[in-house]
Image (spheres, rainbow, N blue to C red):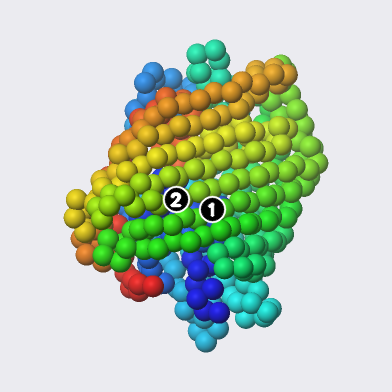
Amino acid sequence: MHAALSRCLSAGLLGVPLVAQTYNSLTEARANPTAYRSVFQVEAGAIGAQADTSDPDLGLDDDISWDGRVYWRNGNVGSRRSVIEAYGGRDGFVANWQDAKLIGDETITRVELRARPWMFYRDGFYDGRDRLRANGFYEGSDYEAYVGFGKDLREGLFVEFGPYYRGLDFADTTYTPATVDTFRLPDDHSAYGGRLYVESADLQFDRRRIAPRTGYVLSFVGEREWNDSDAEIGTDLYETRLAAAYWRVRGRLEWYIPASDTVCWEVFAHGGWQDEKDRLQNSEGQRPLGNQWGDGRVRMRWHLSNSLWVAPYGQLQYSRTLTEDGFGSSKNFFLGGGVESTLNLGEAVALRAYWSYLDNDNMPSIRIDRDVHGEQMFYVGMMVRIGAVRR
């Protein structure tokens, strides 16, 4: 029973799962690659963006900012052997408690609180040159409570279902005023619904290198959501009201394929399909825009030693967005690549750096106070692990 609990409850932006947890990895999947039963991790560094063509009204600019995240996991709480996790970073905050004895019958109860106080929404469309144009850019925040009940259907297959409640707030952004002069923002409102997770996982770790060695984690999540919004959103050319209910489906894959003792191929994919009228979700700026989207990377992790690895990768991104008037749609593909590297200085300290490029104007913001982004991104930082207990 404890082995099943540890496997199903182990919980990067996409593409950095070897180093640290992220908001996405903890909320889009129920099992997540981690070498530790218990650990407290603190990471801090500098992150930068460089735009091919500067356009401050759309947030495209060159800038450098601070970055950091904190993650805590206790995998053996009290006599109940519960699991507690907490994460905080620029991408959001998550805290959850997982227990396998509250209901019994090998059912895992999960209580989860989420918050994304620094959200940026980019309601827009791509022109004929694949350049992002704005209907209106704005900012917001959301806060959620979720209760889930999960169970192993068989070895390696886990299912969880539960209800959630979310509150959403929105505001004009001071950094892109030109895009909101004639754009009507959504009203602050509440949403509630049900969420279903289906996940298959079979993963083995290399204890020498603190990294996955072989296997995969494949996760799917479906949502049905209702809301109490009653305001018009958009411009005179394309103005809509949120529907009373929406559906969403997302998927996430991490797949590790060893090629030799020092080389491991990695495939990371993340995608979603949402209701075409789900205007808020389709405009979230931290991932590809649109009601159909996908982001895939193929990476070669090359271990130069047991402490140092370098991983060049190629990236393909897909985004289906509506046209300016909302009557048609366009499908856009974007190519890119980059390189990541980590140096583990023993169990306690790790140094991490990456550089990436993607020919898409829609990239995650590097700041929390302003929506600043560019096609090139780079980062250098240090992670400290305290109280790490291996599995």
Cα–Cα span, label 1 and label 2 = 8 Å
Instruction: Name the kind of residue labelled 2 in the image.
Output: Trp
Reading the image, the residue beneath label 2 is: 255
Q: Residue at x 43, y 57 (%)?
A: 215
Earlier residue among tags 1 and 2: 1
Res. 385 image quadrant: bottom left
Helix, strand or loop status at disc 2: strand
Circle on res. 218: 1
Residue 134 seen in the current view: no
Quarter of the image where the N terminus is located? bottom right
Residue 38 location, x and y as percent? 40, 72
Horizontally, is 198 left or right of 68 in the view? right
Q: Residue at x 35, y 72 (%)?
A: 390
Helix, strand or loop status at disc 1: strand
Residue 44 location, x and y as percent? 32, 52
Q: Residue at x 44, y 68 (%)?
A: 73
Q: Are marks 1 and 2 in contact (CB under 8 Å)?
A: yes
